[in-house]
Image: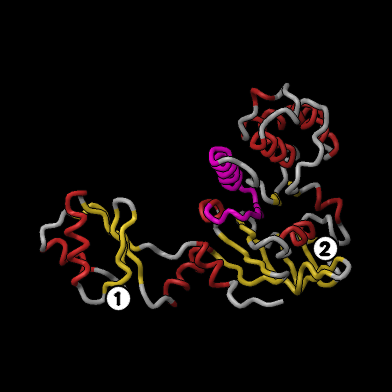
Amino acid sequence: MLVEIERVWKRYDTVTAVRNVSLTIQRGELLGLIGPNGAGKTSLMKMIATLAKPDRGRVRIMGRDARLTMGPIRKRLGYMPAEFGKMPDMTVLEYLSYFGAAAGVPRRERARRIDAVLELVDLVDRADSLVGSGSTGIKQRILIAKTLVHDPELLILDEPAAGLDPRARIEIREVLKELNSLGKTIVVSSHILADLEEICDHIAIMERGRLVTHGSIATLTDQLREASASRRWRLGVVPSALEQAEELLATLPDVSALGREAHLVCFETADRDANFVLKALINAGVTVLEFREEGPRLEDVFMRQTEGVVS
């Protein structure tokens, strides 16, 4: 177990940010932490990063109590905050060298690591540019590079895709997947559920300071599918047969919520499979190009798990 959080509470003045949260993170896991603003995500991440201490409960990182051994833990983790702050008047190379030195990376090793992280985040051609001169996406990649320069085992990234355009979001996703494939354990928060669904293997959902649920995305979506009274399907046919397919499905029993999305026909059935629909289409001579179940998404899991949560 790389991270163990046991019955943790955190309070700021009159606001309880984290309420009795227990969570474990395995080595090599890519955990997505999701929840609305004020859910307690940043407070929890700061406790994992040893930047805040719990009022009650315990946080253990790599087998060490985070309240007692902050120095050794910090050398093995990297934290990226949600806000840029004021970017200094330095080049990217100077900026990374400064943080590498502050993290205790030897001079000879520092140059090699800086070259490696610049290559990883695709910033080699910006090494001599000022850190504050780039776009939001460039700045995010510089912050990720700074977080990586001392080669940490655990990465804690708070909203790394915030404010990015679609291309920059894709680039950040690819960087995180590459880091995870290299063995890094990653905790990442985001409001963009589609991004987390693409890269994460586990999620933790927070609401009003509480941990609502935690587990693998596959397990949570399967549980939601099993609990659902109906299954949703997507059907693709040749364009000339769209109207025929819709008319045919409208006559079949147990087919409901019939509609069209672009070139696809969508419908629901109470059955666990829709083989009877496929059989009817083939018997009618309709050429089927695509036929698949549309399973629950991470968004569906989030909405179901946070229903009725009260403070």
Residue 253 in sight from this viewpoint = yes
Does 185 lie within the magenta span? yes
Disc 1: which residue:
271
Residue 152, percent from left and from top = 72, 45
Q: Nearer the viewer, residue 267 or 96?
A: 267
Q: Is residue 297 left or right of residue 144?
A: left
User: Callout 1: 10 Å neighbours few (<14), some, many (20+)?
Assistant: few
Residue 283 in the image: above or below residue 289: below
Dot 1 falls on a residue whose secondary structure is: loop
Query: Residue at image x 80%, y 41%?
Result: 85
Query: Residue at image x 65%, y 25%?
Result: 124
The segment highlighted magenta reads 166-194
Q: Is residue 124 left or right of residue 234?
A: right
Disc 2: which residue:
65
Q: Is residue 67 left or right of residue 236?
A: right
The N terminus is located in which quarter? bottom right
* Marked residue nearer the N-terminal end (2 or 1): 2
Residue 57, percent from left and from top = 81, 72
Dot 2 falls on a residue whose secondary structure is: strand
Residue 92, percent from left and from top = 74, 28
Hey, what amino acid is under mark 2?
A: Asp
- What main secondary structure does the magenta stretch of the protein show? helix
Residue 80, percent from left and from top = 74, 46
Residue 193 in the image: above or below residue 117: below
User: Callout 2: 10 Å neighbours few (<14), some, many (20+)?
Assistant: some
